[in-house]
Amino acid sequence: MHSVDKISIQSHRYVEATARRECDRTFVSRGGASNGTFTAPELHNPYNQSRQCLYTFLAAPGQRVLVEFWTFDLRGKPPECMHEYMDIYSEMSSLETGELVNSAFGGRYCGPIPPRRRVSLHRAVALAFFTDHTYTPSTLFYGSYRFINATEFEVGTPIPNTLCSYVIDVGKRKTGLLVSPTYPGIYPKDITCNYQFVGQPGQRIRLEFRDFDLFFGGPHCPFDWVRVYDGPDNTSAIIGTYCGQQRNLVLYSSDERLLVTFFTLPRAANTQNRGFKGIFEFSESFVKLDFISKHDAEHIRGSECDQKILSKKESSGFVYHPNYPFPYIQKVVCRYFIYGMQDSQNLERVRLEFQNFSIPKNISNPDTCSDGYLKVYLRGQEATDSYDKHDAELCGDGDIIPSFPPPLLSDGPRLVLVFSSGELQGRGFKAKYTFETEYRVPGTAAPGGLCAFTYRSEAKKRGEFNSPRYPSNYPSYTNCTYTLVATPNEQVTVVFDHFKVRADAWNATAGLYGGATCSEDWVEAWWTGREGTRVPLGRWCGLATPGPLQSPRGALGLLIALHTDSEAVASGFKARYVFEPAKSIFGDCGGNVSGSPWGIVSSPRYPLPYEAPARGAASRVCNWFITAKPGRRLLLNFDHFAVEGHLTERGCPAAVLRLWYESPGPPLELCGEKAPGDRWQYLSSSNSIRLSFIIADKSVGAAGWRAVWTEVTVGVGEECPEACGGACLPPGALCSGLPHCAGQRKSPRC
């Protein structure tokens, strides 16, 4: 006996059994389209007995039932629903006695919110109404039912021994609907449906979901989901897993096979999601992917022609329109995601240079790209609802005079192109992309991606520069140079506003920051001459910020370099520069000193505090040149010293005294405060020394400094009545009243 006949016999028995119950109602289809309404029963129940009424809807073979509530106001209180409620069963496979107990429970409802529509999984729906109130009016609920054609749920050829799995073969159906088993009613729990699409070689499959409403359990869809495989079975690559509510979900297969799996958990019904409805199409006219696979790009699965290009570190390649090298296909949209490297050690940007471009304009509206276009997003673009925020929209045709768009440079590691071919046909485009290291350093960059930047006075009188990727950490294993070029009648000043360079083994003291103390990462600086010469100014690391730098009169400018090794990194530095008219070789003060056995040199206004430079000036500079007789040397002793800064904790960013007393070699860099018991005494290696005191514009001032210089002899065999630190002071020095020697006391002979 056929299963259809069994259900018919069972239904008649069920009807006979339930007819004796005063409030049960049965609605049976006689075939063909039919519909109707139903209301709550009017019951008098003076003794508050438990009353149950069963409403049964039975469709004819080849039909299903759709039940919908229009009003609903049961007097139970959700979620308990103790005294009045309705249970719904829409997945019954038969109407045998006890089938309600064995069939999947579709939920219990009470209160003022009606249940959502139901479509039977087979041929029957049952509504079990329960109440123990003394009176039940017919207005408690009102609904309608329809017996609908079941063929729309048979989206293909049924797979034997499955509930809802189908093979969709292009030979039988080239386009059609794809719906979940009970759409638009609430979908069943504990099911797995597989939809296998089988096309012909050369075809691709387009799947567009017009409605998609699944329970959302989280971004990874751990509960109910639809999963789309780019191939014949579940071992194929996954295009995506989807749940929740999806809008504008359009997917393409890569070839002629596609698998869609719909899965729901076997849990008690606590959700009211309707499932999905989509349309599918097999076609040979969708974009062929060879224009992507032939080149160094990857097709983004699920899209018609979107591609992703990832850097292989400063690599390059080409992007083309679909169907290249032939004219492009009309009404196609392709996206190009071009991604440079971005991690703790790499940061790149994308350069795009066009070698061919022809996207015709609509002659009726030639001032805009109203038909085809190529939109450019220089900061990348991920959100689909932000594609109107493009940086450039390109179109036009260079048939007569080739006029390609200018080169484009991304603002970060990502550049995105959106190509829309419109209704007019053109030759399309070809462009070369190049991944360049992005240092995020303002200035004129050297060609070839080197970390080298130039700042010329003719281009800009003042500006900023920084370590790569500042304020983020600079990369390891990097060498960067910053060349500042002044005109012949100018000088350039550099002031550091932030400085943190890794120095694990740093043990600097008293301004000695050379190679002995900065052996991991460091910053170096030189004066540069117009003949290519260099004069070293120092090497800095750790937190010891370099003091303000100024090129001397007549020099070309300054050269600053950053070196990092392969180990850990830090935030680096930020500095600013100013080109100003050249001052005298002595700067704003200072001078030449010679011909005396001793003397005093001090900060401007000493013993009053020194002052910041005049408003608008980058710095105040004082240079002293002290020269002793040939064969003599110079002893310099600081008896007072207070300059803002700290040699080891923060360096000398606002003011610095540089002392050239050893040759060859960079100067000694001094700031901070000398304690009364400290000995700050320096012996020159020749008969000259130079002092340069530079006060930056951010200086707040301090007490200043004073030093006594003295001509001395060293290594002479004659008697030395007045000695100091291995040097012989000139006669009368100890009686001069000046502290020639650190810690000296007045001679009893004076």
Image (tube, helix red, strand yellow):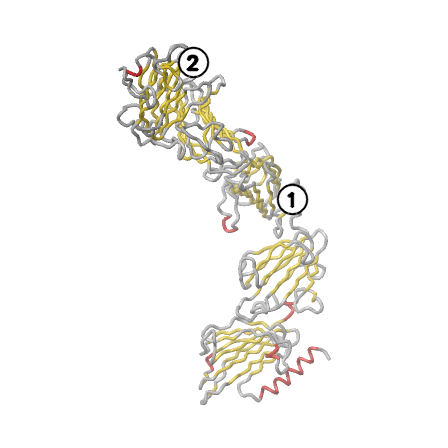
Q: Residues under labels 2 and 1: Cα distance?
A: 80 Å
- 28 is higher (above) or lower (below) than 656: below
Q: Of 237 and 419, which appears nearest the observer?
A: 237
> x%, y% of residue 698?
34, 32
Q: Of 357 and 520, which appears nearest the observer?
A: 520
Identity of the residue drawn at 65% across and 67% down:
164
Q: Is residue 749 left or right of residue 352?
A: left
Tell me, yes or no, whether the two marked residues, 2 and 1, touch with CB atoms within 8 Å.
Answer: no
Residue labelled with disc 1: 292
Circle 1 crowding by C-alpha within 10 Å: few under 14, some 14–19, many from 20: many
N-terminal of the pair, mark 2 or mark 1, is: 1
Is residue 647 in view from this perspective? yes
Q: Is residue 537 left or right of residue 641?
A: right
Nearest-to-viewer mark from 2 and 1: 2
Q: Which amino acid does the dot numbered 1 rest on?
A: Ile
> x%, y% of residue 655?
36, 28
- 193 is higher (above) or lower (below) than 579: below
Badge 1 marks a residue whose secondary structure is helix
Quadrant the N terminus occupies: bottom right
Q: Which amino acid does the dot numbered 2 rest on?
A: Gly
Q: Of 719 and 689, which appears nearest the observer?
A: 719
> x%, y% of residue 461?
40, 27
Identity of the residue drawn at 50% across and 19% down:
532
| Disc ID at residue 715 | 2
Badge 2 marks a residue whose secondary structure is loop
Identity of the residue drawn at 69% across and 67% down:
158
Quadrant the C terminus occupies: top left
Q: Of 501 and 421, which appears nearest the observer?
A: 501
> x%, y% of residue 48?
46, 87
Is residue 365 in view from this perspective? no
